Image (cartoon, rainbow, N blue to C red):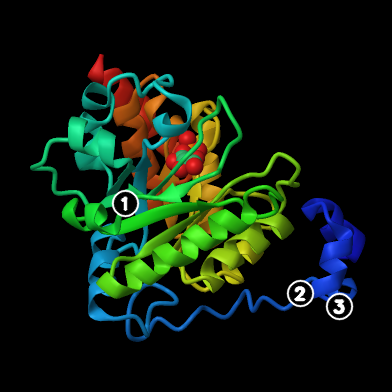
Amino acid sequence: MTLPLIASKLGNPTKLGYFMADLDDIRDGDNFGLNTPADTSSFYLKGLNNTDWGIKNRMARIFNRKSGRTVMLAFDHGFLMGPTSGLERIDLNIAPLAEHADCLMGTRGMIRSSIPADNTRPICLRTDTGTTILTEMNHNVLIAEDDAISMNASAMAAMLAIGDAATEAITVANFSRLVDIGNKYSIPVMGVTAVGKDMARDARYFGLASRVCAENGASIVKTYYTEGFEKVVAACPVPVVIAGGKKLPELEALELAYNAIQCGASGVDMGRNVFQSEAPLAMIKAVAGVVHDGLKPQEAFDLFETLRAEAK
Ligand code: R5P
């Protein structure tokens, strides 16, 4: 990546040149060892060999031991966008899907108010909050760690706005503090890569953003699928899951999940493509078929159609 490219992304070339004198010779990596798997000899998930018992135990709640993967159900969207389609009533829309997900990702308010307390699925608690779609996005702070502990969170998630001049520093600082807290209490932290409005959605960008999460201590990285995703995954030493993004036709969403898994992703943290589906229960089961059972997209879509028809 050249200096002008990085400088234009971050918006202050003079300042950049001042504190990073060698910024004009950052070379893209090209040796990702794609045929050499990470060492998982002492724990089944990559990058966690040297973490302690508590982190491993919580990760084992989230990631299926047999497949090594997870289907996380994301429903934290409301803290940014209010009662969006499919999330009008978490008790009606999400609670019935809970037992079919490997992990539930949401905010403390929605989980406490709308997910029954006898839920046994692990919680990945959205731990940063701040602005909404009505204002400047991503000016976030962290909730108190006591609350994550009292909610028995198996993981904590916070967003990093990499490349966004206004909020990159605050979100990386938030994330770093969250990892300090996570390490203290052995709670894994998931880095959620935001998509900056000026950022190219390509493997170079998502590779950089994912790596920044891992460098700052993430145990899980959530990012977006893109062409060249195998490099994003290879350069990220901890498990990577993909967000689904905007609602797609079901077959396309299943192809997205399949392609990500083929590139080495450790699962999905999918929201809208499940809860905005015509048949959310059928869809989460079809996604699980891809993630855990090796179904091809068309096979998973056939499963979706069968389950949808049965439910009518
Ligand atoms: C993004 O910050 C949110 O954490 C969502 O949970 C994430 O985007 C995943 O949801 P979706 O699959 O709808 O993109």
Under circle 3, the secondary element is: loop
Residue 21: which numbered mark, if any? 3
Q: Residue 187's quadrant in the figure?
A: bottom left
Question: In the image, residue 130 lies at what x, y percent?
Answer: 47, 40
Under circle 1, the secondary element is: strand
Under circle 2, the secondary element is: loop
Q: Is residue 223 above or below residue 236?
A: above
Question: In the image, residue 211 lies at what x, y percent?
Answer: 60, 67
Residue at 67% x, 47% y is 166
Q: Amino acid at mark 2?
A: Asp
Mark 1, residues whose alpha carbon is within 10 Å: few (<14), some, or many (≥20)? Answer: many
Mark 3, residues whose alpha carbon is within 10 Å: few (<14), some, or many (≥20)? Answer: few
The residue where tag 2 is placed is 30
Task: Decide if residue 297 is in sight here.
Answer: no
Point out the frontmost of discs 2 and 1. 1
Question: Residue 184 vs residue 152: left or right?
Answer: right
Q: Is residue 192 above or below residue 211?
A: above
Q: Amino acid at mark 3?
A: Ala
Mark 2–mark 1 Cα distance, whole angstroms, equals 33 Å
Residue 124: which numbered mark, if any? 1
Q: Is residue 28 above or below residue 298?
A: below
Question: In the image, residue 165 lies at what x, y percent?
Answer: 71, 50
Q: Quadrant of the N terminus?
A: bottom right
Residue 32: which numbered mark, if any? none
Q: Earlier in the sequence, mark 2 or mark 3?
A: 3
The residue at the far left in this view is: 118
